[in-house]
Amino acid sequence: MKYTVTLIPGDGIGLEVSLAAKRCIEATGVLIQWEEFIAGEAAIKKYGKPLPDEVIESVKKNKVAIKGPIVTPVGTGFRSVNVELRHALDLYACLRPARSMEGVPSAFKNVDLVIVRENSEDLYMGIEFQEGSGQAKKVIDTVNALSLKKIRPDSGISIKPISRFASRRIVKFAFEYALKNNRKKVTAVHKANIMKHTDGLFLEVAREVAGEYAGRIEFNDAIVDNLSMQLVTKPQNFDVLVLPNLYGDIISDLCAGLIGGLGVAPGANIGDGIALFEPVHGSAPKYTGMNKVNPTATILSGVLMLKYLGEEKAAAKLEAAVKDIIKEGKFVTYDLKIDRNDPSAVSTSAMADAIIKRMK
Ligand code: NAD
């Protein structure tokens, strides 16, 4: 075997889309030995925790992983396994290309954006204090003593740290990506008019880093609400977007919408010498076990993985087959049909079969 890759199929639709992606990646001919692990709800039953140490150790050893989405309970229950993995492995950059593909029903054409989302801090750090708890009271009392503004005593608290270190690291990543991939412009996205000491710092650092690339890559900035409006009116005005964690999450889904939906939006979480590939979408619980959803986002995450491994030819072959099948429109899932109830839509596995056949 040429590579050992950690595979975390995930849950919900994760099992189906991961299997489809695994089969497509294997069909490129690249020899991969898979180390497969469960995580999330199923891991709690087996190991007593949602993210077993073995999973983290495997990715640390293999340096490359691919995963399907994993359910995160809303409001209560265990913390996001997806976020924990990114933190535990210091996968600080989330890279999400959003490119229009011929044949995907969408209100927009010629969208070609790259989202670079900071993955390690911001409101996603999980530093939270429950309403009514002793810790929340302490935090509220401390802040109320330090600030002229008073937090209500019955508040829950989430902390939003934005550091100079992480901002510099992610903005530099975005500029380096732009240079290596012949992109023209980087836009830093923020809400620095309101959050002067967090987003304001992010913007200040972004401007500093942009100076180091002057004359090579253009730079501008945009306030996140205004950016959202501009993206849904003239997405062609943007190129590479670099954003703090939470805005990156939201804008990723918005950009997925611009290119035809979550079914076609791939992603990668990248650290120094280590990477984990996964689709933008979640586990879409209502479709679990139906063999119905679109495997494209996970298969294209596999294309990103093959490129990362230096398997450019295999990546190009798989990407071309995916594009071909989608353009043809015959062997595609329901979400790629103009009428979502079109009875000619095929299953997740049948779409993967067609892609594999097209590569031969
Ligand atoms: P979701 O992305 O799972 O699904 C939202 C909707 O998008 C679905 O109902 C479906 O209509 C559509 N969709 C998603 N993937 C699709 C596909 N491959 N093909 C066709 N249509 C698709 O978002 P959600 O419902 O908000 O989240 C469900 C669960 O997933 C939650 O527990 C959430 O925390 C988790 N989640 C996990 C990840 C991850 O593992 N990285 C990311 C996002 C959400």
Image: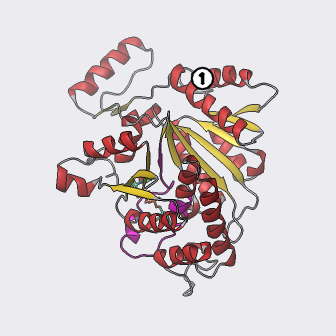
Quarter of image, res 193:
top right
Say which residue label 1 marks. 200
The magenta region covers 275-300
Residue drawn where x is 75% and y is 42% of the image: 182
Is residue 277 shown in magenta?
Answer: yes
Residue 318 vs 2, above or below: the answer is below
Say whether residue 70 is visible: no
Left or right, residue 161 beside residue 329: left
Residue drawn where x is 31% and y is 52% of the image: 73
Say whether residue 323 is visible: yes
Give the colour scheme of this rendering: secondary structure
Left or right, residue 7 beside residue 110: left
Residue drawn where x is 31% and y is 46% of the image: 55
- From the viewer's side, name the closer residue of 137 and 25: 25
Instruction: Estimate the x, y position of residue 204 in percent, counting from the top left.
Output: 64, 20
Query: Few, some or many C-alpha atoms within 10 Å of disc 1 (few <14, some 14-19, many ≥20)?
Result: some
- Name the kind of residue labelled 1 in the image: Gly
Specify the quarter for ligand 1: bottom left
